[in-house]
Image: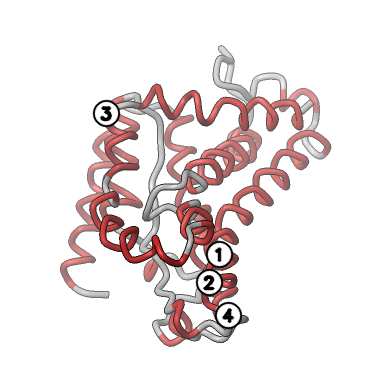
Amino acid sequence: MSPRTTAWIIAGLAVVVVLVRTHHISTFTILLLLALIPSVILHEISHGVVALAFGDDTAKRAGRLTLNPLPHIDPFGTIIVPALLALSGAGVIGWAKPVPVNVSRLRHPRNEGVLVSLVGPAVNIALAVLFGLTWRYLLPVQDKLYTSFTAQLPGPLWAQYIFVLGYINVLLAVFNLIPLPPLDGSAVLERLLPQSLLPGYYRIRPFTMFIPLAIVLLFPSVLDHIFQPALNEWFRLLG
């Protein structure tokens, strides 16, 4: 890890510590941040694992197929943006450093490239279901009574953390399925485009990279409408 990246991580962690010590973010928000980091890391690793299965070892050679969080942390997207969003009350969302994938090295680039992209949201959906079922069937009733957004009395931290892990993975899955580059859902849009339109799409794609972040920062209510149907289904899973 470069000294510059290390400095950014230290600065980002310092921001989080200051926010905690000055009581600008709640315990629930801290749990969201702690759930976000492993969730986005597993999301990114899954891209590299599936790419490797289809013939591209770029991520493996870059040392990114590891559960060690340090190679995956994007100081801006994994720490600073989530902390600032938490402080602003706009919610918590973020990303890890993208795992490098060379689509041209896949055996069937156009079809397998879609699968490499969609495996990330699929992992988040699987995690959301896993933690939702864990919360529903394995937690004692008395621990679940106060584990919610509006509870006056907090339940045990470990019970809240299981709840938050499921919740954050729902958000990550839905957010990454939005069909805008660089989000994973754009791979489906790209695959559906006729071959004749791809050159034009590739020309405009670099200019759409910041649209998802702009939506998060400027129009958070739009995301609420996108997230809510999926969250409603997940709440039904909780029973």
Disc 4/disc 3 C-alpha distance (Å): 38 Å
Q: Which structural element holds mark 3?
A: helix
| Residue carrying label 1 | 114
Q: Nearer the viewer, residue 172 or 164?
A: 172
Disc 4/disc 1 C-alpha distance (Å): 10 Å
- Give the number of the mark in front: 2 or 3: 2
Disc sitting over residue 108 in the figure: 4
Disc sitting over residue 110 in the figure: 2
- Where is residue 116, by image quadrant? bottom right
Q: Quick check: 47 left or right of 16?
A: right
Q: Which structural element holds mark 2?
A: helix
- Give the number of the mark in front: 3 or 1: 1
Q: Which structural element holds mark 4?
A: loop
Disc 2/disc 3 C-alpha distance (Å): 33 Å
**Residue drawn at the location 58% of the way across and 35% of the way down:** 157
* Dot 3 crowding, Cα within 10 Å, few <14, some 14–19, many 20+: few
**Residue drawn at the location 31% of the way across and 60% of the way down:** 200
